[in-house]
């Protein structure tokens, strides 16, 4: 009996990890879902535009069907659970959360989640040394 309990305890983290989907898996799932849009911008595209933000890619999922938002947010929760929350902005019913994961002091992943009652957009920026001020100027067109 002790062995069975120890085996279950040992396998529990594996089972939890196996249920967590990666952002790429979410992109694949929602790219085939009506009312959803996915976007993948590669480093080569940035380079061809003459833009350098330190990102290797930007991936985004937009959910335009309000009934899908709660399930999607539930799928995002495990992805951001071990990330550091940087900022939350709440304006007129629209909420924007920004999370980061750092390795060795440089930002490697940045997730920006914007939600309102009708739409949810999750954006993943990944790269060795993301330069936040350049990302801001890219988004705001400065």
Image (cartoon, rainbow, N blue to C red):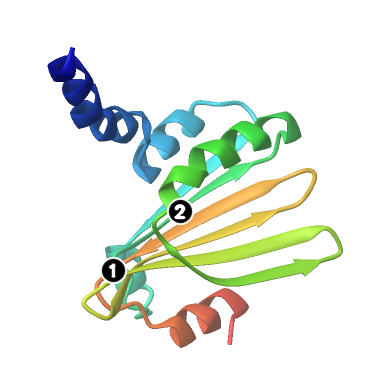
Residue 66 x %, y %: 74, 35
- Mark before the other along the chain sequence, 2 or 1: 2
The residues bearing labels 2 and 1 have C-alpha atoms spaced at a distance of: 17 Å
Left or right side of 95 for 140: left
Residue 115 x %, y %: 69, 52
Callout 2: 10 Å neighbours few (<14), some, many (20+)?
Answer: some
Callout 1: 10 Å neighbours few (<14), some, many (20+)?
Answer: some
Q: Quadrant of residue 28?
A: top left
Residue at position x 56%, y 37% in the image: 74
**Discs 2, 1 touching: Cβ within 8 Å:** no
Does residue 45 lie above or below 9 as drawn? Answer: below
Left or right side of 61 for 110: left
The residue beneath circle 2 is: 80
Residue at position x 35%, y 70% in the image: 46
The residue beneath circle 1 is: 127
Q: Residue furthest front?
A: 2
């Amino acid at each position: 009996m002790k062995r069975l309990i120890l085996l279950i305890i040992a396998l529990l983290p594996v089972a939890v990890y196996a249920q967590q989907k990666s952002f790429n898996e979410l992109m694949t799932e929602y790219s085939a879902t009506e009312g959803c849009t996915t976007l993948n911008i590669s480093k080569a595209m940035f380079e061809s535009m003459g833009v350098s933000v330190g990102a290797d890619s930007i991936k985004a999922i937009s959910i335009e069907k309000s009934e899908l938002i709660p399930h999607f947010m539930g799928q995002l929760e495990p992805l951001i659970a071990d990330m550091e929350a940087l900022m939350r902005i709440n304006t007129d019913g629209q909420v924007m959360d920004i999370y980061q994961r750092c390795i060795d002091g440089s930002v490697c992943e940045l997730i920006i989640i914007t939600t309102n009652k009708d739409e949810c957009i999750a954006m993943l920026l990944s790269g060795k040394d993301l330069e936040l001020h350049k990302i801001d100027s890219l988004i705001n067109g400065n």
